[in-house]
Amino acid sequence: MRSIRLALVGLRAFVSPPATNECTYFQGSKIGLLALLVTIGLVPDGILVWLLVPHGLWIVSLLLTVLDVYAAVWFWDLYASMVYMPHQIHDDALLLNNGFMQHVRLNYQSITDVEAVGTRNKREMRRLDRAAAILSFGGVPTVLVRTSAPVTVTGWFSTSTFAVFVASDDAQRLTSRIRALSTRSISL
């Protein structure tokens, strides 16, 4: 039930998106469009499944219909988490998110370099830094943060890395803000 409520929040955010800033990362994302396409496809998919699967196997048709509805709800949940789980800038650390899929906590003392790398897809990001973790679905402005100590990106597939690509609706402002906070922590 919570998942359906979150999906409705995602749909509402898609129709009337909140204001963006350097900590948000949903503006150029295609996840909302994908969720919309899956939702629109529910009716034709349902009709085709019930027409094409033999009537004796009605349980298969029901299972496929339920999976189709679950996929739509899941994509809206992902979009809602991207909208309402922005990056968090605290006094001691930076929490970077990729919806409910991934997150990483960076201490400002460990940040060695940060740069806005523009709008890139994942293949282009891999060319810039093959070992970096990617907290972005691609196609949105991206920031590359490098660290002196390995950081753990938690999510479905946790990994340890020295560099993280992260999406931001205002990559230049996020870069400036991280730079200011990391140099401030060095001087303290």
Image (tube, rainbow, N blue to C red):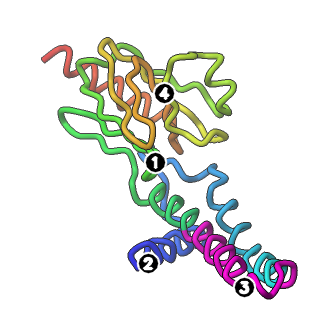
**Distance of label 1 from label 2 (alpha carbons):** 18 Å
**Distance of label 2 from label 3 (alpha carbons):** 29 Å
Q: Which of the two discs, 4 and 2, labels the residue nearer the N terminus?
A: 2
Residue occupied by mark 4: 133
67 drawn magenta: yes
Pinpoint residue 59: horizontal percent, then vertical percent.
67, 82
Q: Which of the two discs, 1 and 2, labels the residue nearer the N terminus?
A: 2
Residue occupied by mark 2: 5
Closest to the observer, 131 or 18: 131
Q: Is residue 157 above or below residue 13?
A: above
Q: Is residue 104 above or below residue 130?
A: below
- Label 3 SS: helix
- Label 4 SS: strand
Secondary structure mostly seen in magenta is helix
Dividing the picture into quarters, in which one does residue 155 lie?
A: top left
Residue occupied by mark 3: 58
Dividing the picture into quarters, in which one does residue 88 lie?
A: top left
Q: Residues within 10 Å of mark 3 (few under 14, many from 20)?
A: few
Which residue type does callout 4 highlight?
Ala
Q: Which of the two discs, 3 and 4, labels the residue nearer the N terminus?
A: 3
Which residue type does callout 2 highlight?
Arg
Quarter of the image containing the N terminus?
bottom left
Q: Residue at x 72, y 77 (%)?
A: 42
